[in-house]
Image (tube, rainbow, N blue to C red):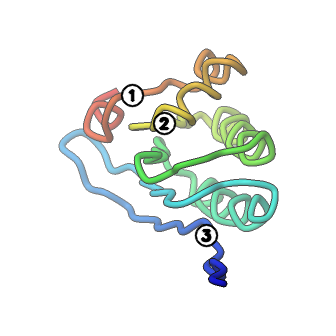
């Protein structure tokens, strides 16, 4: 018998991107964001928010799944950015993630764009 012992975790990468208008922080999420790694996601986003960027873009193109705990972490980061005058934007969510954003009305709270370039243009 074969068992899949590969546990699919969330991978994040953070970069400050210099764009034509002004720099923004880009966080790329790859894998699955759920209760098992929401604390790690919170740490990454808290560190990004602490840098006080004007714009924080979350690239969701590599995210296959997101549960409510991960969504809560993103909404929390959005509130923190809003309090300091910054903006969070979501880019390129795959269908399951886009559906969750619609069903929870999170897409009414945080703008969702088709691509990172659209999100960076505002």
Q: Secondary structure at mark 2?
A: strand
Identify the residue at image location x=43%, y=47%: 59
Graded by Cα atoms within 10 Å as few (under 14), some (14 to 19) or many (20 or more), the crowding at tag 1 reads: many
* Residue at the front extreme of this rendering: 1
Residues at circles 2 and 1 in contact by the CB criterion of under 8 Å: yes
Front-most of 58 and 55? Answer: 58
Residue 49 image offset from top left, x and y in percent = 62, 53
Picture quadrant of residue 78: top right
In the rendering, which numbered label is found on residue 113?
1
Decide if residue 31 is on the left or right side of residue 69.
left
Residues at marks 3 and 1, CA–CA distance in whole angstroms = 26 Å
Front-most of 86 and 89? Answer: 89
Q: Secondary structure at mark 1?
A: strand
Q: Secondary structure at mark 3?
A: loop
Residues at marks 2 and 1, CA–CA distance in whole angstroms = 6 Å
Please name which of the two marks, 3 or 2, marks the residue nearer to the observer.
Answer: 3
Decide if residue 79 is on the left or right side of residue 62.
right
Identify the residue at image location x=76%, y=58%: 38
* Residue at the left extreme of this rendering: 20
Residues at circles 3 and 2 in contact by the CB criterion of under 8 Å: no
Front-most of 77 and 96? Answer: 96
Identify the residue at image location x=39%, y=28%: 113
Compared to residue 120, the image places residue 110 above or below, namely above
Identify the residue at image location x=53%, y=29%: 98
Decide if residue 4 is on the left or right side of residue 59.
right
| Residue at the disc numbered 3 | 8
Please name which of the two marks, 3 or 1, marks the residue nearer to the observer.
Answer: 3
Picture quadrant of residue 72: top right
Front-most of 34 and 3? Answer: 3
| Residue at the disc numbered 2 | 90
**In which quadrant is the C terminus drawn?**
top left
The earlier-in-sequence mark between 3 and 1 is: 3
């Amino acid at each position: 018998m074969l068992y899949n012992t590969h546990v699919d975790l969330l991978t994040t990468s953070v970069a400050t991107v210099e764009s034509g208008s002004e720099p923004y922080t880009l966080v790329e999420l790859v894998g699955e964001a759920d209760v098992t790694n929401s604390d790690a996601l919170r740490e990454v986003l808290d560190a990004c928010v602490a840098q006080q960027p004007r714009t924080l873009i979350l690239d969701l193109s590599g995210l296959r799944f997101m549960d409510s705990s991960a969504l809560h972490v993103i909404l929390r980061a959005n509130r923190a950015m809003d309090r300091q005058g910054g903006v969070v934007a979501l880019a390129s969510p795959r269908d399951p993630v886009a559906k969750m954003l619609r069903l929870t009305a999170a897409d009414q709270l945080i703008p969702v764009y088709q691509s990172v370039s659209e999100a960076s243009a505002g």
